[in-house]
Every structure is written in C-alpha cells, then in structure tokens.
Image (cartoon, rainbow, N blue to C red):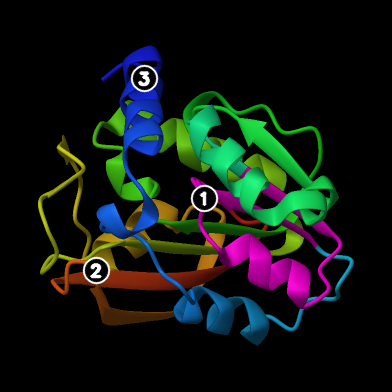
Amino acid sequence: MDPHQAQAHWDKIYRTKQPHEVSWTQEVPATSLAFINGFDLPKSAHIIDVGGGDSKLVDFLLEEGYEHITVLDISASALERAKERLGAKGDRVQWVVSDITSFEPDTTYDLWHDRAAFHFLTTEEEITAYMAIARGSVSGEGYLTIGTFSTEGPAKCSGLPIKRYSEEALTREVSSGFDKIKCITEDHETPFHTKQNFLFCSFKRTLHVQ
C-alpha cells in the first residue's frame, strides 16, 4: 500500500470508528509507561511517539511533566481527535502528520516509542527506511522501544497484513545501531474482550553499526 492509500485508509478508520471500536485502544498504556519510566529520563527529554494516533500515552506523559513530546501519525484525523481530547494541553505537544518511512525530523530524540506501527511495515525497503530514520534521529544516549505483534499474535490488523516478530527477529532488525536491553511478551485485551499477543523490546542507542 502506497502512502496516499495508507493515509486514506487510516483517516477513514479514525473518522468512522470510536476508540471502543478498534482493537488497539488502551485506557492506560501501562507497558509503554513502564518501559519509559525505566529509562529514568529527565522531564526535559525529547520523546516521539511513532504511530501514536489518538493513543492516551501522550496524556500520561504530559501528566508526568515531560516537556518535549512529539506525536507522529500518518492520519491527520487521528491526531485531530487526540488534540480535541487534550484541549489546551495539546498546545504543549508537537503534532506531525507523516508516513514514518518519509519522516524528516528537525531534532534528535532521547526516546523513540512505537507501539504497533512498526509491524505494518512488511517490505525490506520500508523497514530499512524506518531504521535509517530511527538511527539518524535517536540521540547518542537515547533509547528506542518497539511493540509489535509477536509470532503468537494476529496476522492482520484493521484489514491490513502485518509482520509478526520473535524476540530474535526484532532484535536482528534493530541491532544495527542499537543494543537490546530487554524484551517481554504480553496479552493485550481488546475492547472486544479478545487477546492479542504483543512483543515489546527496548534498546539503547550505540555508535557502532553491525
């Protein structure tokens, strides 16, 4: 799917479905917050949530006092919904509408967070572009955390094919420029009371490239 088709696909979803009607909704993004808090970042850290959509992660990060938060998504409709929910608090967030594989950041980040965007990249070209951008924009002392469907997770999401990952496979994709810290798997309970098995891994930026 080319970027224009992908944008139209996701805009339609966010225009026609409410949070309780999509599988990825979390009232409390507990695992993401646990990873982020484990990095012991200063409140002045620059954080980007890749594929953040209208996730409530940004709400919690603002509540915890983080001062430099960017939320990126291919869907303008998703970000508009998040901004509407946050009201005036949303003015403290940088909102970026972009396909992540063509994103051109104008700053570096201390933390790159991605829950359920990476697994939509199913070609080698897309994955290579994503990782090149991540390596170029995560600071030398920064962190990357990615959550994808595990090998026990669904093969599709929102009508689109995804790429499932084992710990070894995800580590291999990310290892050039990052060292693994830890990985966990967990079941996400959807608003429909079904379960999706996720793999979450965290990495530390390194200057060596394998």
Residue 108 is left or right of residue 165, and the answer is: right
**Looking at this view, is 90 or 106 the one in front?**
90
- The CA distance from mark 2 to mark 3 is 24 Å
Q: Which residue is mark 1?
A: 54
- The CA distance from mark 1 to mark 3 is 16 Å
Rendered location of residue 65, percent (x, y): 83, 73
Residue 8's label in the rendered image is 3
In contact (CB < 8 Å): disc 1 and disc 2: no
Q: Are there few (<14), some (14-19), or many (20+) residues within 10 Å of tag 1?
A: many
Identity, as a three-letter code, of the amino acid under mark 2: Thr
Residue 71 is left or right of residue 87, and the answer is: left
Rendered location of residue 118, percent (x, y): 38, 47
Identity, as a three-letter code, of the amino acid under mark 1: Asp
Badge 1 marks a residue whose secondary structure is loop
Q: Earlier in the sequence, mark 1 or mark 3?
A: 3
Q: Are there few (<14), some (14-19), or many (20+) residues within 10 Å of tag 3?
A: some
Badge 3 marks a residue whose secondary structure is helix
Q: Is residue 70 magenta?
A: yes
The boundaries of the magenta stretch are 46-71
Q: Residue at (42%, 71%) from the top-left corner?
A: 201
Q: Residue at (12%, 58%) from the top-left corner?
A: 154
Q: Which residue is mark 2?
A: 190
In the image, residue 58 sits, relative to residue 159, either above or below, namely below
Q: Quadrant location of residue 107?
A: top right
Residue 47 is left or right of residue 192, and the answer is: right
Rendered location of residue 124, percent (x, y): 29, 32
